[in-house]
Image (cartoon, grey):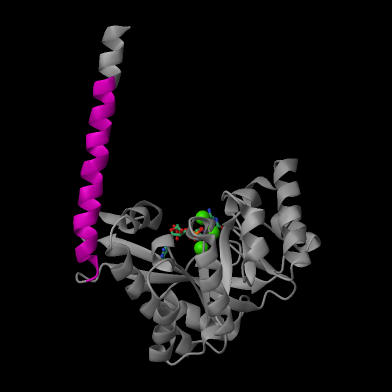
Amino acid sequence: AKRSGRNAARLFDESLDEGIRLRRQIESNLSQAIARDELSMLFQPIVATDTFEVVGFEALLRWHAVAGGPISPAAFIPIAEESNLIHELGDWVLARSLAVLKDWPGQYVSVNFSPRQFRRHNFVGYVMEQVQRANVAPSRLQIEITETAIFDDAERAADTMYRLRQMGFRIALDDFGTGYSSLYNIRKFALDSLKIDRSFIDGMMRERESVAIVHSIIHLGQALGLGVIAEGVETDGQVAMLRAAGASHLQGYLFAVPITAEHAAALAKSGITG
Ligand code: C2E
Ligand code: CA
Ligand code: CA
Ligand code: CA
């Protein structure tokens, strides 16, 4: 038992080392990714459930490292989030996301903000300055945050959200249902929409539990006067269920995968089936 314990400890050390090495590699390369022109943005349409009209696009970051190929944002965002790199990255994402709005007739762009970005000093002034610089109305920016962003200091987060709403920005609570204190949070925060996490949409066709959760989230959103966006919609069966349940908006591969700015501009004008 002693022996296997020691082996287990060494194994743990080694995988830890490996993790640290990978992290350092991502960190050092990511800090140069902007300068090397390795980052790009893709845009995924969000459609109205009843008409399939494209109302907005979610901006999704892509990193294609010259040495090493594509790296998922799910892998590098959390690492950037642990340092000030997230601010540099976030500035780039926001500027690029706002720049495409001039090519769309009226849709909004929905940008993901990490908890650290949202909590930065004078976040409200920062986004206001960026939309003014891009010469677009605040209503054309939807700010996507997760519950993690508002969990730590709920009072301060509530104040930030209130001021953003006052200025006309849209706010969506992302990955809803996966966080800690869902009900507590939506009670006091100025929100426009809830985004139902993809895991529930995915489970809907298989488990009664997921169906029940999706229905509850939609009813809650309706009762509070919020939009409800279902993400990760891949099948007609899901659309039928979500429409019957009353989700206001849908997003997922069934309608379109994340696409380039050029393609998004064409889709913004012609619509999904055009
Ligand atoms: P998220 O905000 O929950 O974004 C939705 C993810 O689901 C995206 O993954 C999208 O490509 C994927 N998706 C959309 N429709 C479908 C579908 O029908 N089926 C399946 N299987 N997947 C679908 P992606 O682009 O890999 O992004 C992963 C996560 O990385 C995002 O999750 C978000 O948390 C983060 N992220 C991406 N871009 C940014 C960014 O610019 N800033 C920040 N802070 N985070 C970002
Ligand atoms: Ca999102
Ligand atoms: Ca999400
Ligand atoms: Ca997610």
Question: Among all residues in the image, which is located at the extreme bottom?
Answer: 135
Residue 111 visible in the picture = yes
Vertical side of 224 occupied by 138: above or below: below
Is residue 127 or residue 153 the one in the foreground? 153
Which segment did they paint magenta?
9-34
Residue found 39% across the figure and 80% down from its top:
126
Q: Horizontal and vertical percent for residue 257? A: 51, 64
Q: In which quarter of the image is residue 187?
A: bottom right
Residue found 72% across the figure and 42% down from its top:
209
Residue found 56% across the figure and 68% down from its top:
158
Is residue 36 or residue 193 the one in the foreground? 193
Q: Is residue 25 magenta?
A: yes
Question: Among all residues in the image, which is located at the extreme top?
Answer: 1
- Asked whether, in this view, residue 156 is left or right of residue 26, the answer is right
For the C terminus, the quadrant is bottom right
Vertical side of 84 occupied by 142: above or below: below
- Asked whether, in this view, residue 198 is left or right of residue 37, the answer is right
Dominant SS in magenta: helix
Vertical side of 255 occupied by 126: above or below: below
Is residue 18 or residue 69 the one in the foreground? 18
Q: Horizontal and vertical percent for residue 63? A: 31, 62
